[in-house]
Image (tube, rainbow, N blue to C red):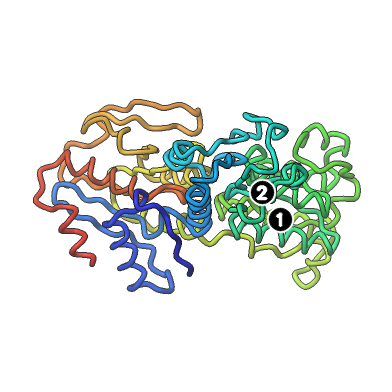
Amino acid sequence: MKSFDVPIIYRSPLITAIKKRRKEEDRLKKDFTPTLLDFGPLQIFLARHFGFCYGVENAIEIAFRTVEENRETGKRIFLLSEMIHNPQVNADLQAHGVQFLQDNYGHQLISPDTLTADDIVIIPAFGTTLEMEERINRLGIRTEKYNTTCPFVEKVWNRSQQIARKNYTVIIHGKPGHEETRATFSHASAHAPSVVVKDMGQAIQLAKYISGKNPGEQFYEEFNGQHSKGFDVTKDLQRIGVVNQTTMLASDTQAIADYLKQVMMEKFNLTKENIEDRFADTRDTLCYATLDNQQAVSGMLQTDADLAIVVGGYNSSNTTHLVELCEEKLPVYFINNEEKILSPKEILHYNFHTKEELLTRDFLPEKEPVKILLTSGASCPDALVEGVINKLVNFFETDVTIESLIEQFV
């Protein structure tokens, strides 16, 4: 796989050594057991897969290269929205003079009408809507060179277009307000009727319109803002295919697809042999990195531990799903950097359910060894994970150093 030129400040010598060793020992990625960092009184179990994915590294490389290439030109550089859902990376870009046109929810911060053909506009890793891209291009700004859309997001768009040509309606499993889902909806609805479902609950409600249990007119109120213009509930749910926001829980997407597939089989008396008459096979749209990270957390959770720490941006969808998986098994603390670990007694962490930061006391148990599971989201720099490890290690008396661990894995 291609390697990227990512700023050294995001790298970690320790994490790089660990990932390289694990890759050499497990090239087929079949082993999801965590890596043990044994400091004696503290044992940290590091997930098999975590941190920057292909799409994130690609986006960061393009963004910082654009800044460097235009340092002396005086050109203004804009991002349509956050590059990725990591506060450190976005703050670093802003420190280099990059300005954001929108916030995470598509609310305008700077009017595109103030742009000129001499400006540079970077499309973030999530992609953007066809409408926004056309608006930027009409100003004479070419976005091709500065388009950092993740290839796996584009794969979802291409798959949506393929099934649209076969007259399937596109069902998108995603968060309606998320940048990626808005972009995917825009691309899908340009070719076919489209509906966004945020979870299994909404999939079950959608099924009631497929089966005819709910009157069609209720659909437009229940899925207000989540269906394409001109959607006809009486005919546009006769043939469907499910694609996903790439950062959703893969198991959730598969469960929704399997459920709707069964609904179509019962509604139209289908068999496994003729199911494609009504339901498209779209399993190939699941992002490999999202799936790897989630499977790695599942593998990590097989380890007997006291607590888990998940590092990443609080608005990162893929990171919150890692937190969700951990919540099922043990106490989990969602933080965006090591500074949130205030002391051996106190930690500030984010509750994504209530969207508030909480202070928990006595989060480290008074026992030895303390066993901690550790992972991070796909937009989290490895340097932040090493920062968390360092912070935790400093709370314990140990002769094991980060340097000695690096030598061990190298």
Between 34 and 389, the one nearer to me in the picture: 389
Q: Mark 1 points at which residue?
A: 242
Q: Is mark 1 on a helix, strand or loop?
A: strand
Whichever of callouts 2 and 1 sits on the residue coming sooner in the sequence is 2
Place of residue 362 in the rendered image (x, y in percent of width and height, measured from the top left): 24, 30
Place of residue 175 in the rendered image (x, y in percent of width and height, measured from the top left): 63, 41
Place of residue 343 in the rendered image (x, y in percent of width and height, measured from the top left): 22, 31
Between 391 and 75, the one nearer to me in the picture: 75
CB of mark 2 within 8 Å of CB of mark 1?
A: yes
What residue is shown at x 71% (from left), y 65% (from top)? Answer: 281
Residue 25's place in the image compared with 372, above or below, is below
Residue 203 seen from this side: no
Near mark 1 (Cα within 10 A), the count class, few <14, some 14-19 or many ≥20, is many
| In this rendering, position of residue 347 left or right of residue 380 | left
Place of residue 147 in the rendered image (x, y in percent of width and height, measured from the top left): 62, 53
| In this rendering, position of residue 162 left or right of residue 103 | right
Residue 315's place in the image compared with 128, above or below, is above
Residue 160 seen from this side: yes
Between 403 and 70, the one nearer to me in the picture: 70
Q: As shown in the figure, which amino acid type bears the numbered disc 2?
A: His
Q: Is mark 2 on a helix, strand or loop?
A: strand
| In this rendering, position of residue 394 left or right of residue 191 | left
Q: As shown in the figure, which amino acid type bears the numbered disc 1?
A: Val
Quadrant where the C terminus sits is: bottom left
Instruction: Estimate the spatial distance between the alpha carbons at disc 2 and disc 1, rounded to whole Å.
Output: 7 Å
Q: Specify the quadrant of the image occupied by residue 300.
A: bottom left
Q: Mark 2 points at which residue?
A: 173
